[in-house]
Image (tube, helix red, strand yellow):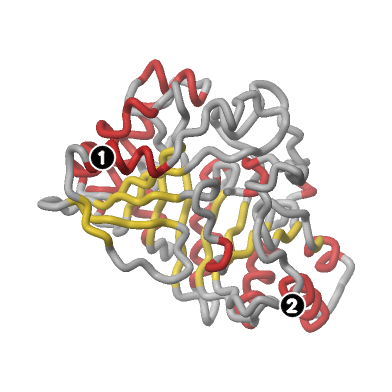
Amino acid sequence: MKDQFGRELTYLRISVVDRCNLRCLYCMPAHGAGFETWDDLLSYEEMVKLVEYFSELGIRKVRITGGEPLVRKDIAELMFRIKEIPGIHELALSTNGVFLKGQVQKLQAAGLDRINISLDTLNRNRFLQIARLDRLSEVLDGIEEAVASGLHPIKINTVLMKGINEDEILDLVRFAIDKSIEVRFIELMATNGLVQLDPQERFFSTEEAKERIEREYELIPLDSYFSSPAQVFSIMGTKARIGFISPISNYFCARCNRLRLKANGMLKTCLHGKEDLDLKALLRSGASAEEIKRRIQEVVWVRPEQHFLNELQMKHQDFQMSHVGG
């Protein structure tokens, strides 16, 4: 399945729930978030059926996201069913890690291949400031369990915020070295207008982060797969890796191979674009598999060439990150 610019679409990110157990500054407003009713969310049966269709169209990797996916009950059951679908070669999970401890073995048994865990600070008081809840110890316990399980790769996702956590860049690098895992520094992006964190005032580039790290460590560039959004480096003399994701300073749209399915069944062909297709409505109206696949191919073909976060004259298409899954 290709778009009009020749990009092959092989990666589907599924937001299984729009709720989260944290209220991170850059993701959600402090109060109220406009959650869908449970009946308005896709059922697991509907998700599995849609993944079957996407697999037939060429999707090979699926990532389970949220909100916070571990908020939804029996998520391992869904993951097992997705991993059993012919053509799905890789199953990943993005989580904030709060509910991860005690679940890693079950998730691995369900077919989990890799995991990304959000961690923006190692400081308890700062975690409370960013996430608005005191849950750092649970996140660290979850990471510890994932490392002990032998699950690989484990990636830590850190959103860079000027004046909030950029002074912890080297601490997070040392954390990655100690655990022999990868930490990925991500540039702050504009999202919903209800999110009070100012993306321009708080922006800190990955290039600045890289310069700080290189004063202390020698970074060795690694070949990452073509469609990866991250520039990845190993750290000389360690088993750790550093990734830099730069949607603002060095966007990677020309390599983008991913689609996003929201928990309410809306398909997005660009994270920062419009909602392109209501797949839940098609399913519940009794549309045939061939009709649904045809409609998916039509919206994929006309997906935009690039996002417009860097074009100040264009209004950003607001979205709430917890509804999309990043």
* Mark linked to residue 112: none
Instruction: Measuring from the top left, give residue 238's x and y in whole percent.
Output: 14, 51
Of 195 and 294, which appears nearest the observer? 195
Instruction: Identify residue for label 1.
Output: 213
Q: Secondary structure at mark 2?
A: helix
Pinpoint residue 164: horizontal percent, then vertical percent. 44, 23
Q: Residue 111, located in which quarter of the rendered image?
A: bottom left
Residue depicted at 78% across the width and 41% down the height: 37
Counting from the top left corner in percent of width and height, residue 142 is at: 34, 40
- Look at mark 2 in the image and give the residue it sits on: 297
In the depicted structure, whether residue 287 falls above or below residue 170: below
State the CA–CA distance, disc 2 to disc 1: 43 Å
Q: Is residue 81 visible?
A: no
**In this rendering, position of residue 220 left or right of residue 276:** left
- The extreme top residue here reads 125
The amino acid sitting under disc 1 is Ile
Q: Is residue 260 above or below residue 283?
A: above
Contact (Cβ within 8 Å) of mark 2 with mark 1: no
Quarter location, residue 67? top right
